[in-house]
């Protein structure tokens, strides 16, 4: 019985750790959104023809922000060098960004989902996927439920 009790306790602590990480990841994501939109609107305010530059630079800065805060406060360091982790972070965010574009197009153009609702539905897929990619691949953390 003691072994079973210890097993249940470790499962709960692993699930709790992952849940707390997911919440922290969400907070980092919210700050990323504010940063990328802030930079985007700053460029547009300066000159509306610079919207692509603003979007691109906003994305780049927000991914560096995500890397910094995720490495520092959300996930443990995998021991890989900073450069390799930064590249993996950009690949992870870039992949979910591209997936989000495809999903957005399909939802709006093929399934006639509202342009206001589709991005929110999109987040239900891209946020958990990005979390798993960052956790399991970038920072090489195992999901311990044992």
Image (spheres, rainbow, N blue to C red):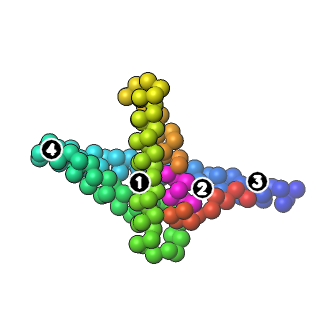
> How many neighbours does mark 3 have within 10 angstroms: few (below 14), some (14-19), or many (20 or more)?
some
Q: Find disc 1 in the rendering and name its residue.
A: 94
Mark 1 vs 4, N-terminal side: 4
Q: Which residues are magenta?
A: 130-136
Residue 29 screen position, x and y as percent: 41, 49
Mark 1 vs 3, N-terminal side: 3
**What secondary structure is the magenta-colored segment mainly?**
helix
The disc at residue 8 is: 3
> How many neighbours does mark 2 have within 10 angstroms: few (below 14), some (14-19), or many (20 or more)?
some
Q: Is residue 94 left or right of residue 16?
A: left
Q: Find disc 2 in the rendering and name its residue.
A: 17
Q: Find disc 4 in the rendering and name its residue.
A: 49
- The Cα atoms of the two marked residues, 2 and 4, are separated by 45 Å
> How many neighbours does mark 1 have within 10 angstroms: few (below 14), some (14-19), or many (20 or more)?
some
Q: Is residue 39 left or right of residue 85?
A: left
Q: Residue furthest left?
A: 46
């Amino acid at each position: 019985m003691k072994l079973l009790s210890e097993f249940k306790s470790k499962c709960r602590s692993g699930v709790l750790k992952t849940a707390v990480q997911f919440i922290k990841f969400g907070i980092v994501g919210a700050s990323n959104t504010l940063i990328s939109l802030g930079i985007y609107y700053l460029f547009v305010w300066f000159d509306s023809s610079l919207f692509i530059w603003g979007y691109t630079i906003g994305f780049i800065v927000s991914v560096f922000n995500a890397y910094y805060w995720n490495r520092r406060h959300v996930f443990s360091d995998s021991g890989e060098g900073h450069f390799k982790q930064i590249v993996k972070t950009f690949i992870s965010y870039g992949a979910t960004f591209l997936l989000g574009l495809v999903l957005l197009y399909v939802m709006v153009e093929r399934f006639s989902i509202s342009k206001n609702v589709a991005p929110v539905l999109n987040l239900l897929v891209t946020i958990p996927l990005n979390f798993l990619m960052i956790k399991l691949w970038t920072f090489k953390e195992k999901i311990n439920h044992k």
